[in-house]
Image (tube, rainbow, N blue to C red):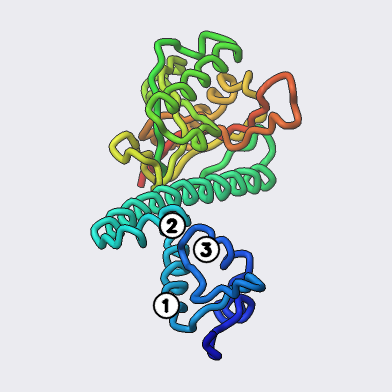
Amino acid sequence: MKNNYLSIGEMAKMNHTTISTLRLYDEMDLLKPAYVNEATNYRYYDIKQNARLDLIQYMKELQMNLKEIKELLDKEDVNLIEAILIKKKQQLVEEIDKLEMTKDAITRTIYSLERFRKSPRSGTMTLEYIDRRRIYSMNTDLNFYEYDIDVYESILNQLKNDLVKHHYPQIYYCNAGTFLKKEDFIHQNFVSHEIFVFVDDHFPKKEDIKIIENGMYACIYLDDFHKEVDYAKKLLHYCQENNFNICGDYICEVLSELSIFDHNERSMFLRLQVPVSFNK
């Protein structure tokens, strides 16, 4: 036996791995010892085998599993290595996208809860600048203002099914909102057939996104879903009193859902809003 052979323990320590890992590589024919003592069954390695071990460790860092590494090293096919790496890269891109969407959803939820804590009490009127927002919307045959919350829940379920049907992440199914056309709001004609959820830059289909432009909004806060129509009338009166020009569609936005505290009905904190401009 060569005097400069490394014991399995020395080989493991030198390469920041474990003895059990080297034994596994031996069993898989990934990295065989340079010499095995027949009497003691001790494994010994040549320091030049570090090159092979470095390659295995590098491939693992590229998210390859041992079965894939074994196949690549056995076939010695550069084209196969490239093809698998391209596939791995695409898998990582998809995983990163999912993680980004999850991170954004957590951020939105934290913001929603913080905004709920700091929002004015129900019935408060405000004039606010609201930044540009992205939404995904769905049309429905029903005018949900003609029905009770049971039908609203049914429409929400349709929205969830629509997201599933189009293979959109259900992580966006949160804090839905509804529209009322500008003229319908002015004339207090409560007819709406569109429901939406807010999305972000990581939403899969950019062409399905609609934009709500930024601007000044007259708003009223509300903690009772059943009183939306009454509070929408108060919002219109507020705009008329202050000579605001209503310049866009009315939006009922669910700021926060706290159904964790209510097992019988969806608990919603709402911000009713309409874009306005001012006479100069």
Give the residue at x 40% y 24%.
Answer: 165
- The spot of residue 166 in percent (x, y) is 37, 28
Measured Cα–Cα span from mark 1 to mark 3? 14 Å
Residue 63, position as x, y percentages in the image: 45, 58
Q: Which residue is mark 1?
A: 51
Badge 3 amino acid: Tyr
Whichever of callouts 2 and 3 sits on the residue coming sooner in the sequence is 3
Q: Earlier in the sequence, mark 1 or mark 3?
A: 3
Badge number at residue 25: 3
Does residue 153 appear left or right of residue 63 in this picture? right
User: Which element is circle 1 on?
Assistant: helix
Residue 182: give its label.
none
- Can residue 208 be seen here? The reply is yes
The correct choice, above or below, for 119 with respect to 176 in the image is below
For disc 2, the marked residue is: 64
Tell me, yes or no, if residue 215 can be seen here: no
Answer whether labels 2 and 3 touch (C-beta < 8 Å): no
**Which image quadrant: the N terminus?**
bottom right
Marks 1 and 2, the one that precedes in the sequence: 1
Q: Nearer the viewer, residue 60 or 271?
A: 60
Q: Nearer the viewer, mark 2 or mark 3?
A: 3
Q: Residue at x 28, y 56 (%)?
A: 80
> Callout 1, which amino acid?
Ala
Amino acid at the residue labelled 2: Met
